[in-house]
Image (cartoon, grey):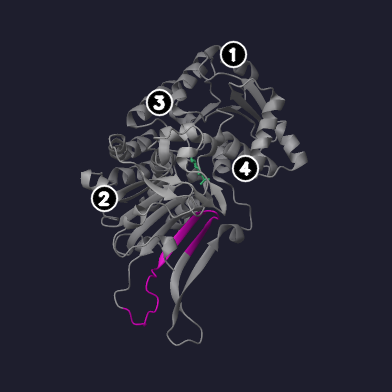
Amino acid sequence: MNQSTKFELVLFGSTGDLVTRKLLPSLYTAFINKTISSSCRIIALGRKEYTRKDYIKFVSAKFLDNNLSLENDLWIKFSELIFYLQVEANKSSDYIKLNQFLNKDIINIYYLSTAPDLFTIICTNLAINNLNHKNSRIILEKPIGNNLKSSREINEHVKKIFREEQIFRIDHYLGKESVQNLMAIRFGNSIFEAFWNRQWISSIQITIAEKIGVSSRGGFYNQIGALRDMLQNHLLQLLCIVAMESPISMDADVIRKEKLKVLQSLKPFNKATLNNYVVRGQYQEGLIDGQKVCGFLSEENIPQDSTTETYVALKTEVQNWRWSGVPFYLRTGKRLETHNAEIVIFFKELPIKIFPNKISNFSNRMVIKLQPDDEIKLYFLSKEPGEENNLKPVFLDLNFTKVANKRIMEGYERLLIEIIKGRLELFLSQEEQEVAWKWVEPILDKWKNSKEKPEQYISGSRGPFSGDTLLEKGFLWHEQII
Ligand code: BG6
């Protein structure tokens, strides 16, 4: 990476959770580690009547709220890169000051981290004010739209203004080290291909569990829910990387086409599978790390009768030659007992057991961990030294931090660097998003028309009871296994 590449990053939605909890911390880390130019400028836009100093104060308070440490001297230097402009996203005349402020001779990146219903007006206002030029790029944060129709409308509108190579549809999970390493492991080695199919794999689980609740994002989250916030994008993208065929090259278009084929092969839902294979839950009060936390309905800006899901789990299948018959279990939720993101590949049972096995619920599996650490573990049984034929579970551990002896970049940092380089491999195509929307829509429709409430679960638990019964007989969630 040429860390001297200069750029201006314009943040729409600069007082929101994403900017203060993820983007600015990633930029700060990149700045400290010199992976971005120290003469870039970060231009925060917002409705609030902040001065630059007020905004920086607001951001540093948010860093501290999120337990992020600030090294005094470095923070002062970093904050010199931050500017604030009072701009209403839907007021075209406000963009004049942005136009005057930007240096268009270097890369200008517009990051749309607002609610998706503002995306089209922002693009229109950028165009009216001549802010689309040869050096400009635009980042669209997920969810793009609320459903297939609105997602298509947004994308079509953005494409009238920006060329495809200027549009970066971001999913920060694709920037995570383990996800990229999964591609490297699958397609850079010959040994895995032979068993990466229905003949050897019995099931696949993809989990993103969070301890955090919706915190200050209640109003926004209530419109979105876990399915749109996490499953339609992050979980399905992870599923694509696990299930895709080998691309013939690492070109963005080639990778996107392979992922698209996976999404197109997902088994469509029908009435029976919607009833039996999809679970939604909502958290109640409980304990997280010994601290009492409130239920979803008591969070700020949540109506008392909200049926928004904070947990979703489902079973699906990729209907192609490689995967037919292999269940894929996907789940995500807030206020769960652990902070954990992982993909677990379960291998089939032995055809014949010659060792007296005292361990009843063990299976060979490969665990690709994305959170809290980036690592890959391969579980198998080995003989206990000295004990006759006594097998015990052991694992091979590939911890990327230890192996590389280097700092592991966080998803947003990596993806921002890719955007500065103008590389699209780790970003989504419009088609991928649309097929993903089309696939989840029957679930959204069912919930919209249903009088049933989401199943309640206690904060700090493993989620609703039906999350466990979703699994076919003989299968358990990874954390329930030795
Ligand atoms: C975001 C969701 O995309 O991902 C948040 O909007 C969620 O609700 C976050 O908390 C999780 O990301 P990570 O990298 O912390 O697992």
Kind of element beneath mark 2: helix
**First to last magenta residue range:** 353-377
Q: Are marks 1 and 2 in contact (CB under 8 Å)?
A: no
Task: Give the mark nearer the N terminus: 4 vs 3.
Answer: 4
**Three-letter code, disc 4:** Asn
Task: Give the mark nearer the N terminus: 1 vs 2.
Answer: 1
Question: What residue is rendered at 54% in x and 44% in y?
Answer: 411
Tell me the residue that label 1 is attached to: 96
Residue 402 falls left or right of residue 347: right
Label 4, label 3: how many angstroms apart (C-alpha)? 32 Å
Residue 421, image x and y in percent? 56, 36
- In this rendering, the answer to whether 4 lies above or below 379 is above
- In this rendering, the answer to whether 162 lies above or below 285 is above
> Is residue 247 something one can see in this rendering?
no
Dominant secondary structure of the magenta stretch? Answer: loop
Label 1, label 4: how many angstroms apart (C-alpha)? 34 Å
Please tell me how crowded label 3 is: few (under 14), some (14-19), or many (20+) other residues with Cα within 10 Å: many
Question: What residue is rendered at 47% in x and 28% in y?
Answer: 115
Kind of element beneath mark 4: loop
* Magenta stretch encompasses residue 167: no
Tell me the residue that label 4 is attached to: 66
Looking at the image, is mark 1 or mark 4 nearer the viewer? 4
> Is residue 68 something one can see in this rendering?
yes
**Three-letter code, disc 3:** Ile
Question: What residue is rendered at 40% in x and 27% in y?
Answer: 155
Q: Quadrant of residue 205?
A: bottom left
Tell me the residue that label 3 is attached to: 154
Task: Give the mark nearer the N terminus: 1 vs 4.
Answer: 4
Kind of element beneath mark 1: helix
